[in-house]
Amino acid sequence: MYSLSQRSLNILSTCHEDLQTLANEAIKNSPYDFGITHGIRSPKLQNKLYQQGRTKPGKIVTYIDGYNKKSKHNYDPALAMDIAVYVSGEITWKLAFYEIVANHIMSVSERLFEENKISNRIVWGGNWKKFKDYPHFQI
């Protein structure tokens, strides 16, 4: 039903093979369209995100600074990907849509793992106890 845009595919190409396989499979019958917004991230960009809500205005979006502690995005290939969900062609940040898409992605990831099409189990940032990161999926 859906497919990833060239922009999403370019970003996804910076990610671990398992995340590439997962995203390409999950988009096919996803309940909502989604795109890939982040794959690999430099320590400098990670630190810029870390400064949000601290030295820069906005809500805190990460507790990992990219220098003292590496994000899964700071590896090459990236061990994490972030998504954005689209509803009626527009990005939404409403939690309900991320939960629906994440449940779908996690279901696809379990199937792919059981079929030995990916070698790592996937973790969704929305399941974390301390800091919820709803667009985030990682190995």
Image (cartoon, grey):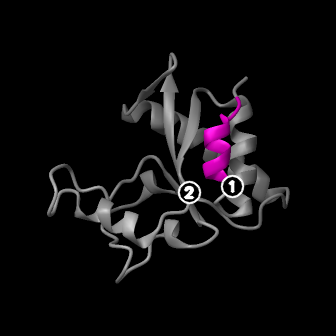
The amino acid on which the numbered mark 2 sits, given as a three-letter code, is: Gly
Name the residue rendered at 76%, 50% in the picture.
111
Magenta stretch bounds: 3-13
Q: Are marks 2 and 1 in contact (CB under 8 Å)?
A: yes
Q: Which residue is mark 1?
A: 13
For residue 51: magenta? no
Residue type (three-letter) at the residue carrying disc 1 = Ser
Name the mark on residue 82.
none
Q: Residue furthest top?
A: 88
Q: Which residue is mark 2?
A: 39
SS for dot 2: loop
For this orientation, the residue located farthest to the bottom is 68
Relative image position of residue 9 (x, y in whole percent)? 68, 44
Instruction: Say above or below: 81 vs 47.
Output: above
Residue that appears at 72% across and 60% down: 18
- Please give the name of the residue rendered at 38% of the width and 35% of the height, measured from the top-left corner: 95
Q: Is residue 135 above or below residue 70?
A: above
Q: Main secondary structure of the magenta part?
A: helix
Q: Within the magenta stretch, is there residue 10?
A: yes
From the top left corner, tell me how far across and down residue 2 is, in percent. Answer: 69, 26
Quarter of the image that includes the N terminus: top right
Residue 117 left/right relative to 84: right
Q: Position of residue 41 (x, y in %)?
A: 49, 63
Mark 1, Cα crowd under 10 Å, few <14 / some 14-19 / many 20+, is some
Q: Residue at x 62, y 42 (%)?
A: 8
Which image quadrant for residue 30? top right
